[in-house]
């Protein structure tokens, strides 16, 4: 990973996640995101210092400075990387942050079910 790139660990089994990754690939004109599918047979969370349970529970972003962002912070990092931080900026506002963070946790736990319910095949 170059000094400028952010590595996004996403669930390729999740139709909504696949759709979002396809969109992020299209808008990432500067090549600032690298995508790693945690459902790939050769994926190992340990190589990133994480557990399988952790990566299955939330989106993770490995930031250029070596930090790991999780859940909504990883979403914000991905959008920042592609130059669209303004889209998710309200999710970090102090009064809204707890609401978006809780909503993300509910989504992450139920993402496969939600994807099926919405009829998304990714």
Image (cartoon, rainbow, N blue to C red):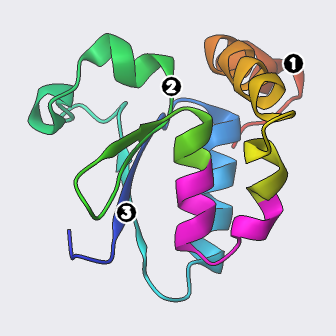
SS at circle 2: loop
Return the disc, 1 or 3, that comes first in the chain's sequence. Answer: 3
- Quadrant of the snapshot with the C terminus: top right
Return the disc, 1 or 2, that comes first in the chain's sequence. Answer: 2
x then y, percent, for residue 23: 68, 64
Q: Residue at x 48, y 34 (%)?
A: 11
Q: Which mark is residue 34?
A: none
x then y, percent, for residue 116: 78, 21
Q: Residue at x 49, y 38 (%)?
A: 12
**Residue 44 falls in image quadrant:** top left
Q: Which mark is residue 6?
A: 3
The answer to whether 87 appears left or right of 47 in the picture is: right
- Mark 2 = which residue? 58
x then y, percent, for residue 89: 77, 57
What's the magenta bit mostly, secondary-structure-wise?
Answer: helix
Please determine whether, in this image, residue 89 is positioned above or below residue 56. Answer: below
Q: Residues within 10 Å of mark 3 (few under 14, many from 20)?
A: many
In this picture, which residue range is highlighted in magenta? Answer: 76-87
Please determine whether, in this image, residue 28 is positioned above or below residue 10. Answer: below
**Residue 16 falls in image quadrant:** top right
Q: Are marks 1 and 2 in contact (CB under 8 Å)?
A: no
Q: Residues within 10 Å of mark 1 (few under 14, many from 20)?
A: few
For the residues labelled 1 and 3, the Cα–Cα distance comes to 31 Å
- Mark 1 = which residue? 117
């Amino acid at each position: 990973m170059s000094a400028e790139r952010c590595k996004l660990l996403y669930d390729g089994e999740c139709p909504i996640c696949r759709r979002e990754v396809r969109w992020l690939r299209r808008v990432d004109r500067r090549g600032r995101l690298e995508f790693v599918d945690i459902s790939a047979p050769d994926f190992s969370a340990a190589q990133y210092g994480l557990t399988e349970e952790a990566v299955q529970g939330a989106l993770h972003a490995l930031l250029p400075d070596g930090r790991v962002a999780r859940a909504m912070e990883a979403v914000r990092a991905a959008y920042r990387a592609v130059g669209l931080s303004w889209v998710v900026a309200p999710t970090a506002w102090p009064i809204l942050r707890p609401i978006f963070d809780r909503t993300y946790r509910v989504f992450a736990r139920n993402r496969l079910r939600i994807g099926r319910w919405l009829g998304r095949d990714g």
